[in-house]
Amino acid sequence: MKLKTKDIIDKLIVLSIIIVCLSIFLPPFFKSISISLLAIAVLGAFFSKAYSLKPSVNKESLLLIAFFFLHIIGVFYSSDKNSALFDLQIKLSLIILPLLFIFIPKQFLSKDKLWTYFLAIIIGLVLTIFYCFISGVVRSISNSLPLVGEIIYTKLGAKFHPSYLSLFASVGLILTYKIPLNQFLKAPNQAKLIKIFTIALISFFLVMLNSRSGLLILIIAYLWILIDLFFVEKKRISALITLFVLIVCGFFILNSNFLSMRYRNAIENIAQEKNINHESNSMSQRSFIYSNSWTLVSKNLVFGVGTGDVKSTFESLYEKENVRFSSYLNAHNQYLQTTIALGMVGLLVLVLVFLFPMIRMLKQKQYFLLIIFLLIGFSYLFESMLERNMGTYFFALIYVLSNSYLSTQKPKLD
């Protein structure tokens, strides 16, 4: 009976982590359900005595938890308590997932198991991509609209923000490139074909998302893939073929009006920065926000304005400068957003949240994880990714999975 109970609990824990990974692309309700299921599975493992309670604490998880606690402290000196509590609700996964992974038995965080969870993220991404394209095709047919207009930029993203999807897809691209599919499929040729198809699909999706920051992180991702293929994997023919395909695709994008229009407009806006209307487009809006952010930061340099007062602080700035946007705009930069909310203390902790795992990645030569963290960190320069449930959930999950992967590595003796 005990053996049967342990077997059920084992399957439940693995299944619940897989569901947690798939939930990245689902609404917040499903994320809450998946986390609750994982919590029940972990509690069941200990209460049934199938596993002994042996928490595995590391400084990386503690830093992420500390980052959340700073937001709790920021509630107390926020004037808008409702906004502050709402912000805590959005960021709950930053504390819940690290705490749960501290208590998950190590047997479920082995390298093979972790690749299973990464595979679940890739599958969730692929399903989301198909959903986005199919939704666009349906809209095009139903409303007799041009197909291209329905499968590009915000229309393609449907209910998702293009910058968020671009980051998720770029991380999925790296995971797809590195995943040992032979572990799941016995036919090597079949595994290779599936990899090529998935990489091509994700890349096409990233191009059609037409996000400026997405294009930059896509270029960074492929630069790393080419370097890894050529110098590490020693697959130089594959690297050269990939480079040739990328050059051809890049030429097509640059010469395609509907794909390159946003990038050309961005360049023109930068060139005419002094003469543009700050309310006219996203580039000029960001320019206005960035140029005035230091004024906001300097007023509350050490501890910030508080978890719930960032919105009112920006709205006061818009009123003072007589600038009117169609809706509230945040800092569009997570580092600035955190600094305005929690001051230099918050910024320092956020930087350490990235820095400590990246040092371990360098030491253990886990460069695919390092490039994933660099992509996330780079995307934070253009979006306040932790101000939406999808962004915090994604970051917390990638963070705990990456640190679990690092913990499976045996440290090399000097």
Image (cartoon, helix red, strand yellow):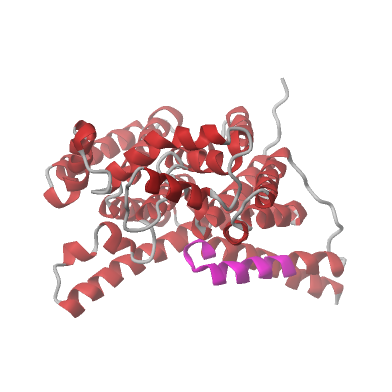
> Which region is colored magenta?
23-40
Instruction: Look at the image and tell me whether residue 189 can be seen.
Output: no
User: In this orientation, which residue lies closer to the viewer: 47 or 167?
Assistant: 167
User: Residue 125, relative to residue 48: is it above or below?
Assistant: above
Decide whether the magenta segment is chiefly helix, strand or loop.
Answer: helix
Q: Residue, x 16% and y 40% (percent of image)?
A: 251
Q: Is 31 part of what is drawn in magenta?
A: yes
Q: Residue, x 21% and y 36% (percent of image)?
A: 267
Q: Position of residue 388 (x, y in %)?
A: 50, 57
Farthest top residue in view: 414
Q: Quadrant of the C terminus?
A: top right
User: In this orientation, which residue lies closer to the viewer: 34 or 180?
Assistant: 34
Q: Is residue 403 left or right of residue 40?
A: left
Q: Is 132 part of what is drawn in magenta?
A: no
Q: Residue, x 29% and y 54% (percent of image)?
A: 209
Q: Quadrant of residue 344?
A: top right
Q: Position of residue 319 (x, y in %)?
A: 38, 49
Q: Position of residue 380 (x, y in %)?
A: 46, 42
Q: Position of residue 229 (x, y in %)?
A: 40, 34
